[in-house]
Image: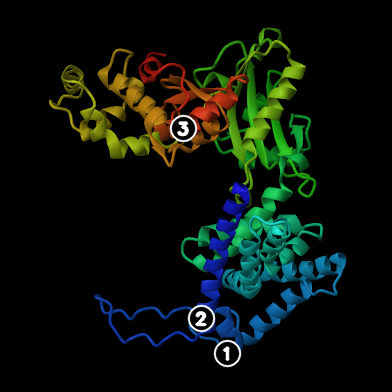
Amino acid sequence: MTNTTEWITRSVSRLRSGAASADKSTKAPKAAPDKQAPDGAAKAPVPRSTHERLQATLRRGNESLSPRALRRLLADLQEVVAPQVSELEGGRRAQAVAAWYSQAEPEERRDMWLLLCEQFAPDATRFQSARQRYEAAAGTADEMQAEISLRRSLVSPRTRLMQRFAVFPEGMRFLVDLRAELLPQLKSDKRLVALDADLEHLFSTWFDVAFLELRRLSWDSPASLIEKLIKYEAVHDIRSWADLKNRLDSDRRCYGFFHPRLPNEPLIFVEVALVDRISSSITPLLDEAAAPADLKKATTAIFYSISNTQPGLRGVSFGDSLIKHVVETLTAEFPRLRTFATLSPIPGFRAWLGKNAGAMLQRLDDKRRAELGRAVGAEPPLAAHLLAAADKALELDARSPVRQALVECAAYYLGRELQDGKPVDAVARFHLGNGARVERLNWAGDPSAKGMKQSYGLMVNYLYDLKRIDKHRGMLAQGKVPMSGDIDSLCRG
């Protein structure tokens, strides 16, 4: 009952938002007073809704499609989901619309998005009636049937339309690309949110892990597939074919999730190094001249790169399932493996410290502050002094007060900085949300220009203790980051 109530609350919220937009769009906007902006520029006119534009004769302002072309496009979309049309015929008609879309200008595509949002929304009257029946049936024998009716009333014609687009062979690719193009526009135009929500909901079903295939990618894989690794690698850029061959060597593994409707496109892939201990630096792992490790001695699998490849699938989670499947696959092939850990970047650390260095300095006791001041040549040290010294992080020796301060700040960032109960760092949020724990910080783990830009070269190991994954998730749900010991021991590690 609680889950049903939560689901209804979310759905009602979305429907009310869409209905409110529709109500406003059916009424002609009031004439805005002729006021001048402070700089003398006139206010931009309020964009007309598709309801207004469909009733108009002439195009206005920056509108892309003329009213006639907009009506023609709407008719084409309506024919895709016409009640008398079969799935296959609906898919054929959807393919024709997709062909038009592929040749359309960006603003013309935006007009199609707006039609999908405003002309294919749920029936508000039907929903209100179903909601009243549900509320009246609460606690009675008719409650379940009323709930079914309420759920059906919230299914928009837009959802059915998107399902028809998925029928033709390239339809799934079309929808994923459409959402990738749509996502950057959501902040500037809230009218598009409903379309995004429907696509995300459909993708979460269509791309459920039950429908995905785990495949190993090797040097013997088709060249077109190997090239995708170069294209989509998001953590450590692949510099050359030799670099790629090293990552696919005998002591390495690369796995990806594939969907049957996107057979040659990895949705997400992970690169793994098989070693004899937890790695503290990415440099030896990416060393093309290094000899392959002895697999007979391998006890540890290091996940050193995980890359999502499809921006249009944002919000659809694959990572936790991918890691679990890879662990099972590796364990079956290498029974000696006992440790599963990452060597991960800390992409948000440097930007965070730039805003919080002053507050972190206030946490130091007088002795530590004085030591740091002498090291940076300014007493008392200010945020600017610490940040300037941190720019030369790779030159600092193990006893440097600046180095120790940076490590402590990174430990605090990973272990204490939460937003809405989740780590503010994106990579930490991913791995800790999957049940890993913060195991160890590594100084100069990534000395590359990118590593310095992200985190002054610091990297972190997240450990996947398979027996404690649920416990770690529970700790995070309570607002406590799972760590090996406390922040002080993490710094010493």
Compute the Cα span from label 2 to label 3: 47 Å
Q: Are marks 2 and 1 in contact (CB under 8 Å)?
A: yes
Determine which quarter of the picture holds residue 406: top left
Residue type at mark 2: give it: Arg
Image coloring type:
rainbow
Q: Residues within 10 Å of mark 3 (few under 14, many from 20)?
A: few
Element under disc 2: loop
Q: Nearer the viewer, residue 188 or 12?
A: 12
Q: Which mark is residue 56?
A: 1
Mark 1 vs 3, N-terminal side: 1
Q: What residue sits right under mark 3 in the picture?
A: 478
Element under disc 3: loop
Query: Residue at horizontal 55%, vertical 26%?
Result: 436
Task: Locate residue 57, reporting x and y percent.
Answer: 59, 92
Task: Locate residue 237, reporting x and y percent.
Answer: 56, 35
Task: Locate residue 263, reporting x and y percent.
Answer: 78, 45
Task: Locate residue 135, reporting x and y percent.
Answer: 61, 62
Q: Are marks 2 and 3 in contact (CB under 8 Å)?
A: no
Q: Is residue 188 left or right of residue 413?
A: right
Determine which quarter of the picture holds residue 489: top left
- Does 228 appear above or below 413? below
Q: Is residue 155 visible?
A: yes
Q: Nearer the viewer, residue 171 or 125?
A: 125
Q: Residues within 10 Å of mark 1 (few under 14, many from 20)?
A: few
- Does 361 appear above or below 43? above
Which of the image's four quarters has the C terminus?
Answer: top left
Query: Residue at horizontal 53%, vertical 26%?
Result: 472
Q: What residue sits right under mark 2 in the picture?
A: 48
Q: Residues within 10 Å of mark 2 (few under 14, many from 20)?
A: some
